[in-house]
Amino acid sequence: MAGLAEPFSSVNALPLDNLLSRIGDARVVLLGEASHGTAEFYLARQRITRALIERKGFSFVAIEGDWPDAARVDHYVRHAEYPPSEWAAFSRFPTWMWRNEEVRGFVDWLHGYNSARPAHERVAFHGLDLYSLYSSIRAVLEYLEEVDPDLAIDARQRYECLAPFEGEPATYAKAALNPDYQTCEKPVLDMLDELLSRHRRYAEHDSDRFLDAIQNARLVADAEEYYRTMYYGSHSAWNLRDTHMFETLESLLKHYGDGSKAVVWAHNSHVGDSDATDMSRRGEFNIGRLCRARFGKELYTIGFGTDHGTVAAASNWDAPMEIKQVRPSLEGSFERLCHQTELPGFLLPFKKAQGRVLEALSERFLERAIGVIYRPETERQSHYFRACLPEQFDEYVWLDETRAITPFATGVLPGVPDTYPFGL
């Protein structure tokens, strides 16, 4: 493996030229992360993404984040003229995942990069996820109140079905288990169909704002199904979520045209091909698998890994963020294999591997995944699964020691303009 690896001393020294050459003419580049709270993963993705934008003309960045929150960022980075949404971006759990200094640095760079470009050439920033059910409802209503007040009244009535569950959307699943309960499926789908039927009238006026409204309406419909099926098992919920993210990506590529290119930021567990992991045995699939089937050789997927350091994570859902020590990788894991090279960092281009090297790398190793929750006391059960890395990713970025991201409090942002996405 040491002969295949391309070493580097720090994120700032990433050998981008060789990497960009391997990416070639890919239309979609998926950039992973082994945790949601590691600074170096965000910084490495930022460097790669900037190069893809500046040197390969990529059209937009799509993240594992909610659509309406990312729309607030998009409004800022593309210098939109219409008023921004009233909510601050990514202000609910897990706030640190996108409200951190590493993301802020990229957002401010993209704002500056777009400032000298005509509106139709500005690089966009979008969210793929579906957890923003009620923010998306508000976004649809705000849009319709401006462009079609009569339809806004109908929309408010149709979405009223979901209002009782705003405090805890997961309770909707329990209510939907009652066979006598009238679910919200029909009204939210009717609302989406109503908007789609008015495509020409609305889109000709402002195609970007119509895209935003349609995507929020789709999100409401998909989130309704997601929460309604939660009690049927995590596998169906996972598949619904990743299908939504993939279809959102497809919609964006269609919106931006035949020559458009996308770079996606999401966890390794979403972007790596699920067929190469334990997920497939559980009947789960992900964005990486769907993209591989759809885009084939026009896809390039990059995974990330680390051995030890610190990470920003919680102990339970909705619990406070903590800076936790990441335990050294387990024996039998791919991370341990990388750590044993004693290199601080390297790129591992799997497609260049041949012979015995490829055979050795193609074993099913343990692989670590840390999300917004990290439980080191149950590390093996909670955070490891088996995978064949060369089938999961086209390339792998190794960073031996890493540190936690730097979340910022709103108090450190006085005096920012109303358009700033991370404002108060």
Image (cartoon, rainbow, N blue to C red):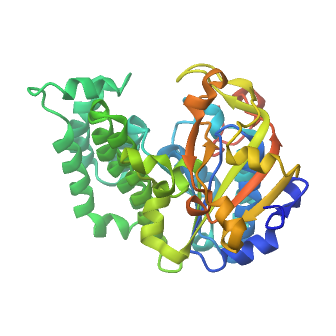
What residue appears at the point 29 percent right and 70 percent down from the top-left corner?
200
| Left/right of residue 141 with respect to residue 417 in the rendered view | left
How far across and down, in percent of the image, does residue 22 sit?
70, 75
Q: Quadrant of residue 311?
A: top right
Relative to 421, 160 lies left or right: left
- Residue 307 position within the rendered picture, expressed as x and y whole percent measured from the top left: 77, 40
Height in image: 153 above or below 44?
A: above
Using the image, determine if residue 364 lies above or below residue 206: above
346 and 314: which is toward the camera: 346
Q: Position of residue 19 (x, y in %)?
A: 75, 70
In the image, residue 176 above or below residue 340: above
Residue shown at 27%/31% (left/top)?
Answer: 162
**Residue sitting at the far left:** 180
| Residue 313, quarter of the rendered image | top right
Kindly identify the residue that appears in the image at 74 percent across and 62 percent down. 348
Residue 273 in percent (x, y) is at 51, 58
State whether residue 174 appears in this view. yes
- Can you see residue 82? no
In the image, 31 versus 5, the foreground residue is: 5
In the picture, which quadrant includes the C terminus? top right
Residue at x-position 14% and y-position 24%: 178
Quarter holding the N terminus? bottom right
Q: Compared to 281, does 360 lie above or below?
A: below
